[in-house]
Amino acid sequence: MFVSIFPLRIEDTHALQVLNAVLYFALTTSMRTHTCGSLNAENVDQHVKLCGWVQNIRVLSDTLVFVQLRDSYGSMQLLAEQTKMPRFSEQKELLEQLNTDSLIEVAGTVVRRPEEMIKDRAQAGEIELLVDEVKVLNHAELLPFNPHIKSKLPGEETRLAHRYLDLRRPELQNNIRVRSRTSMAIRQFMDDNGFVDIETPMLFKSTPEGAREFLVPTRVGAGHCYALPQSPQQFKQMLMAAGFDRYYQIARCFRDEDLRADRQPEFTQVDVEMSFIKKEDIQGVMERMIQHVWKRIKNMEIPVPFPRMSFAEATSRYGSDKPDTRFGLEIVQVPEIALDQHTVAEVLVIPNGANVFSTKEMVPFVDLIRSSQSNNESRLTTVHKVNDNGASGIGKASLLSRYLAHSQDTQPKQSHLKKILNSVSANSGDLVFVSERSVYVTPANTTLGRIRTLAAKLLHERGQLDIPKDKYCFMWIEDFPLFTREVDDANGRLSATHHPFTAPVEKDLPLLYNSPEKVHGQHYDLVLNGVELGGGSIRVHDPAVQTYIFENILKLTPEIKASFDHLVTALGHGCPPHGGIALGLDRLVAILTDSPSLRDVIAFPKSANGRDLFMHSPSVATAAQLSEYGLKVLETSK
Amino acid sequence: MFVSIFPLRIEDTHALQVLNAVLYFALTTSMRTHTCGSLNAENVDQHVKLCGWVQNIRVLSDTLVFVQLRDSYGSMQLLAEQTKMPRFSEQKELLEQLNTDSLIEVAGTVVRRPEEMIKDRAQAGEIELLVDEVKVLNHAELLPFNPHIKSKLPGEETRLAHRYLDLRRPELQNNIRVRSRTSMAIRQFMDDNGFVDIETPMLFKSTPEGAREFLVPTRVGAGHCYALPQSPQQFKQMLMAAGFDRYYQIARCFRDEDLRADRQPEFTQVDVEMSFIKKEDIQGVMERMIQHVWKRIKNMEIPVPFPRMSFAEATSRYGSDKPDTRFGLEIVQVPEIALDQHTVAEVLVIPNGANVFSTKEMVPFVDLIRSSQSNNESRLTTVHKVNDNGASGIGKASLLSRYLAHSQDTQPKQSHLKKILNSVSANSGDLVFVSERSVYVTPANTTLGRIRTLAAKLLHERGQLDIPKDKYCFMWIEDFPLFTREVDDANGRLSATHHPFTAPVEKDLPLLYNSPEKVHGQHYDLVLNGVELGGGSIRVHDPAVQTYIFENILKLTPEIKASFDHLVTALGHGCPPHGGIALGLDRLVAILTDSPSLRDVIAFPKSANGRDLFMHSPSVATAAQLSEYGLKVLETSK
C-alpha cells in the first residue's frame, strides 16, 4: 500500500515505492519515530513521536485544543485533551503562545477519528494524534507572509527576499524535489551507459573576446583574472583527446547577461561528449535518456527516435528553428510572387483570425510587423483580412489603413496579392500575413514565425486551437548553415552559426574552400514544443581544418586565434573524432513541472536584474579588498 | 564471464558486471562494433570493427605488419598480412606513416593466436585481429611525451601543460573513473535515503571579512561584487528553514589560498544537512554512506559505528585532532613533572629510535622542536636517548649537545627527567621526547603529535613499524571546545573554533553565559588514518543564542554582524533544529585510489601556484574588460 505524499505530486510509482520505504525507516531520527506523511490507519493505537511546523492552532474550549502539524511529507491533526494529557494546562498555555510555523516535537497515540469527522480516506484523513507531550523546538516570530495562504502571497520581490519562506510553498517544494529526481534519473542513465562523470574547472581562462564572461581577479598579478565558464566546451573536447570516450557532467555555467534580460547569471547544463561516433549515436543516447527521464518523472512513454527536420524546413514551415509542432498554422513559401530573386515570399493564414481577434488584440501583431521592418529583418510584412467575396480586404481593411499607412508605397502590387490569396486558398474571415525577406540572411526566427506563435497562443486562450499541455513533440533540428552572414549582403563577413568547433557535414567539406556559405554544419538542436532544450554538434578533430576555419573563414585576429592554440595543438596530438551536446537542466525541469519561470525551479535564483534579494548580493567590495587584487574603482564610475 | 578491463583496476564485481554489459552493447557506436576491451576468445571468427589509438607498429617484413591498437577499455593486436588483406601495400604504407597515438578505424576478423604466441589467457591474450581494412581517423604529430612509457615521463609542469596527454596514463584514467564511480555511489546512497540534491548558488555574497574568498565583479555598479562560496553553509541552513529536511549536494567550493600553499583554489565537497536530528543521526547516515562507498569501490566491509574520541583525548594521546590510529606510539601525559600549573608535560617514547635513526635522520625532528619553540607552540621540547644503564643520555647525547646547546638554560631539572624516564619505562636504545606546553591553548596538533607522525613514517619505511595500507581506521573526533583563545593567555579573546553557527553541547549551554571558554561544541570531524575527511556540526537554531554568540562572545563589529542578519531572521521564522557535515571529495578519492597528490584525482587541476598551465590561465584582463566593471589596475601594481 502506498502512502499519499503531501506536498509531493508523485506521478512515478517506482519513486513512490522508494519514498514509501524511506518514509518508514530512513526518515526516522532520534527525534521522531515517524513523519506526518508516513502515518495512516494502520498505525492506530501506536505511540509515536513527530516533529514539525505548527500550521494552525484552534483552542476549541478550555479542555480541548486542535493543532495542525506539518512536516515535509504530510500533515497530521493533533488533539490535546485535558482528560488524556498530563500537565494539560501548562502545555495548552505553551501551545497558545506559538505563532504559525513554530517548531514542536510531540509524543502521542494514533487514534481513529470519530466517523463523522472523517473527511477523506487518504492517508491521515482517518486518524489523528492524541498528544501526551509537547516540546517547543523553536518559537517563530510573526512571519512576513504565510507561504500556505496562496491568495495572500506578496509580490515576487518580497518572496525572494524571504526565499526560505517561499520555498515552503507546496509548488516550490515539489519543483525542487522533482529537479533532484530528474538529475538523479539522468545520472543513473548516463552511469548505466558507461559515461564517466568528470568535473571540469569553474576557474577558467579569460579570453579577450569574452564579452559575456564573468572575470575572477587573482592575486597572481594585478589584472590577472580567471573567467567563469560559459560552458565546459574546451575541457570536454580535451577529455576526448585524453581518451575518456564517454563523458558527462551536470555542470554549472555562467553568463554575464545584459542586466535587462530576464536571465539567470548562473545556469546548469547536462553536458555530454562522446568519441568515435557519428551524429546518430549521440542523438540515440539522448533520446533514450529523455525517454528514461519522462518515464521516471511523469510515468510517460516517449516514442523514439525523434523526428528530424532540417533548419531550412523548420524556418520555412514554422518560421522558427525551434518550432512548436503540436499545432499546424504552417507558413507557405510562394516563390512565384517574390518581387525579385533576392527575396523570399511567405504567407501565413490564420483561419478565422479576422473574426476571432479584436482590433485591440491585433496591436501586438502590428507591433511585431513594425519592429521587423525597422530592424530590417523582413523587407515587407503586411496583414490582410479576407472578406466575404474571397478578395482581400486590402486598402479597405481598417487595420491596414490604421497601422500601415506609412508603408503604402511599399505594398505589394494588387496582382501579387491576388496570386497569394489564390495559392493559399484563404477563406472569408481569415487573417493573411504576407512577408518578404532577403535570401542572404537565414534568421532562426522569422517575423511570420513570431506571428504564428503569438496567434497560436491567443487562439489557444480563446479555445480556438488545441495545444495539449501533456503532448511532448520532441524533434531534432539539423543541417544548420555552418556559417552565418553577419549582414544582409551576398559579400557579408561570415561568423560561426553556433561555435567555431562545429564540424562541416562530410559531403559539404569540399565547399569549405570555395563556397563556405553553402556548407552545412553537423549541428543538432533538441527541440520540444517550441522550446530549445539544448544543442550540440560533431566537432572538428582535424587541426588543419580547424586552423583553416579560424584563419580563412572566421578571419580571427592573431591574438584571438592564439587563445585557441592549445586546443589546435591537442587535436594534433591524437584526438579522436568526437561530438557532444548540452541540455539546459533548468528549462528541462521547468517543462517537467510546468513552471512558468526558471526561477520556480532554482532554489536560490537571482532576481531579473541579477540580484540575490535574500543575501543582498552583489555587495560593494571595499577598496582594501580590491587592492588585494591590485584593482580599484575607476574614478568616473564612482 | 567477466572481461578484463584495461586500464581500469576493477575491485568491485558489481561494477564489473555493469561495465561488462555496457562493453558489449552501449559502447557500440556506428563507428565500431566492439571495443578492444570487449573482445575475447568467444569472438573468434567474427568480423568486427574497432577504433582506437595506434600504440605501436612493428613492420616484421614486406608482407607482415603488427599494430598494437588501444582504446579506453583495452588493447588488441592487429595483424596486417599481405595474403589476407586487399590493397595491402597501400594500407601498409598508410600505417608506416603513422606516429604513436594516431587514430585509426579497422575492420577485420578475430582469429586465435598461434598456440606458441599466447602469452596469457586473459581477455585478448589468446586472440588477434586479422585486418582487412584500415582507415586513418586522425594523424598524430610527434607527441611531446609518450604517456605510456612510465620511465620517460617528464616533470609535472610539462605534464600539466599537456594535461590531455597525461590523462591517457592508466593511473590517471583509473583515478578519474574511480572518482566518477565514487560520486555515483554517494549519490545513489543519498537518493535511496530520501536526501534531495539541491544546487546552491556559486555567485554568493561578498562579505567584508571574507579574506579568502574570490570576488566576481558585476555590472550592477562599480565595485559591486559577488563572491565565490567557500562552502554552501548559509544556503544549506536556509534549506532547513525552508523545510527540505534532508539535503545533499556534491558542491564546488572556492578558496583564494595563499599562493605558496599547495592547495587547489577550487575543490569539491559532499555537502549534507538534516533537520530534526541529533549528532548521532547524521553520524549514522555518514557511516552507512562510507560503508556503501567502500563496498562499491573496494569491495570491502567497513564496520560501523565508527569509534568516537574526544578532542581532548585525541590531542593528549596522539598530539593531533586527526590521529592515525593504525599504530600506537602514544603520547603520555605526566602531570606530576609539570613545571607549574600553567604547563602540560608530555612524553613520547620511540622504541629503539636511538638505534634505528641515523644522526642525519634526526635533523627533521630537531627542526620540528626548534620551530615549535620559536613559534611558542611549546614552551620546551627536548629529545633524549636512553642509554644502556637506563639513565638518560642527556648532556652526553651528541644530538642534544649538537642541536640543543642554545636551550641549555631551559632544560628540565635532572630530577624531572628521572621521574619521566621512570614513569614511561623507556628502554635502552629508545628515543624519548619530552614536551611542556601552555594549558591556555588547545592546539589541534602538538609538537609531539608531529614528531609521532614523522617517526612513524620513518619507522614504517625502515620496516620497524607496521602501518597497513588497506586498514581503514575511521573515527569521529568530538567535544571540541566551541571557542578557542586567540593567544596563549587566560584572558585572550575567543574565536569560533570551527564556525560561528556551531551549537553548544546541550549540557554546556548554561556555561555559555559565564564561562564560554569551557563550552564544548556539537562539532564532529570524520577522521581516517590521520587524514581529516570532513567535519560538521549541529547548528544553532535559536536566534537569541546565535545573536548572543555574535555579540557577546565573538564581539563581532556591527558591520560584520549585520552581514549575518538575514540568517538570524530566518532562524526566527520557524527554522527547525538541524545539523550537517561536509566531506572533501578530492581527498576521499585520493585515499580510495591511494594517490599521493590531489592533482592526481582532478581532471584539470591548477598547479601549486594556482595556474592552469594548459589553458594559460589566469590571463591578463584588458583595461577595456576591467572598465566594463568600473575597475582599473592600481597604478602601484603595474
Image (cartoon, coloured by chain):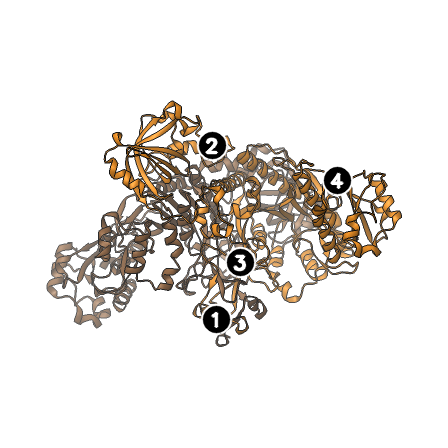
Chain colours: A orange, B brown
- Between the C-alphas of marks 2 and 3, the distance is 39 Å
Against B288, residue B434 (above or below) is: below
User: At label 2, which amino acid type do we have?
Assistant: Leu
The numbered mark, 3 or 4, whose residue comes first in the sequence reads 3
- Between the C-alphas of marks 3 and 4, the distance is 52 Å
Q: Are marks 1 and 3 in contact (CB under 8 Å)?
A: no
- Quarter holding residue A89: top left
Mark 2, mark 1: which one is toward the viewer? 2
Provide the secondary structure element on which disc 1 rests. loop
State left or right for residue B111 relative to residue A370. left
Extreme residue in the bottom direction: B636
Question: Residue B75, can we see it?
Answer: no
User: Residue tagged by mark 1?
Assistant: A630
User: At label 1, which amino acid type do we have?
Assistant: Gly
Q: Are marks 4 and 2 in contact (CB under 8 Å)?
A: no
User: Residue tagged by mark 2?
Assistant: A16
- Between the C-alphas of marks 2 and 1, the distance is 55 Å
- Between the C-alphas of marks 4 and 2, the distance is 49 Å
Same chain? Circles 2 and 3: yes
Q: Chain of mark 4?
A: A
Provide the secondary structure element on which disc 2 rests. helix
- Between the C-alphas of marks 1 and 3, the distance is 20 Å
Provide the secondary structure element on which disc 3 rests. loop
